[in-house]
Image (cartoon, helix red, strand yellow):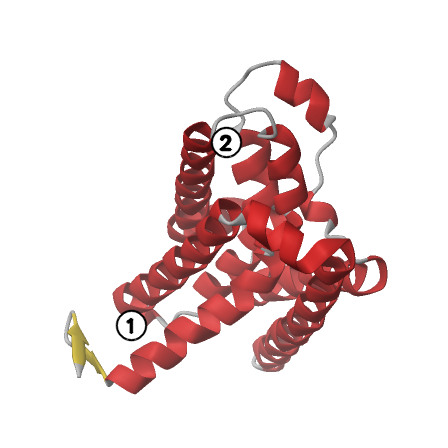
Amino acid sequence: MITIKGFTLSILEFIKYVSLVVIGLLPIMNPLTTIPLYMALTQRMTAQTRQTHARKACIYAFCILASFLLLGNGIIKLFGISMPGIRVAGGVIILILALRMIFSGLDSSSSVDSDPDDIKHANLDYSFSPLAMPSLAGPGSIAVVMSFGSQIPGEVSITGHIIVIIGIAITIGVAYLALSSATYIEKLLGEHGLQAITKIMGFLLTCVAVQFLASGIHDFYLEFSAT
């Protein structure tokens, strides 16, 4: 049993909820789509420098997502947005990105306007941009995190946020492993293999988006029927 601020969860329940966060976030983050950009940007760097950029990018991405999770309610109150609105909007964004992943094999949230060669020759630290944001912590990932945050019941707010943060950390850990192993993954899967994995993740992401939409529409109905 795990007890957090008086709220008790079994080990299996804790693993279940953390797994739901990872399953919802990993397909939209999709570190595999970041590998080609990462490889192009670090092509002429030493192995140590490449690892440093991968580590810093993942740390930045974690901080970005955790910040939106913790500040999401403040943003909602500031702009007068309802919780069902966040869920529906997040579901729509995620669904669009997921369909693009399925039918084109690419996730537009992971694309950047700058040419990799231009960024590479500029000799800049690009671990924050474009690797951390918008590649890893793009609009889709932020929408997923805020959607999860909006579904945390008030009576278990601390426990829920801890679970989501752990899920984010695990997902970022997977992203770090992917970037660290970029050379081997690219050689192993090849271009067609990367596209196939992206389409599979796009399907899983579609299921998550539909769930968010259904939950938001249901809450909208309850909210308006009560008035």
Give the mark count: 2
Q: Assign a secondary structure to mark 1.
A: helix
Q: Report the front residue among 175 and 146.
A: 175
Q: Quadrant of residue 190?
A: bottom right
Q: Assign a secondary structure to mark 2.
A: helix
Q: Is 97 drawn above or below residue 15 in the view shown? A: above
Residue 12 drawn at (x, y percent): 31, 86
User: Can you identify the residue that label 1 sits on?
Assistant: 156
Quadrant of the rendering where the C terminus is positioned: bottom right
* Side of 64 where 121 appears, left or right: right
Specify few, some or many for label 1: CA neighbours under 10 Å numbering under 14, 14-19, or 20 or more: some
Kind of residue indicated by mark 1: Val
Marks 2 and 1 sit apart, C-alpha to C-alpha, by: 33 Å
Quadrant of the rendering where the N terminus is positioned: bottom left
Kind of residue indicated by mark 2: Phe
Q: Which residue sits at x=49%, y=58%?
A: 145
User: Can you identify the residue that label 2 sits on?
Assistant: 128
Q: Residue furthest top?
A: 122
Residue 54 drawn at (x, y percent): 46, 39
Q: Is 80 drawn above or below residue 63 in the view shown? A: below
Residue 187 drawn at (x, y percent): 65, 52
Residue 86 drawn at (x, y percent): 58, 60
Q: Report the front residue among 196 and 8.
A: 196
Q: Which residue sits at x=42%, y=58%?
A: 168
N-term mark: 2 or 1 = 2
* Observer able to see residue 108: yes
Q: Which residue sits at x=62%, y=37%?
A: 39
Specify few, some or many for label 2: CA neighbours under 10 Å numbering under 14, 14-19, or 20 or more: many
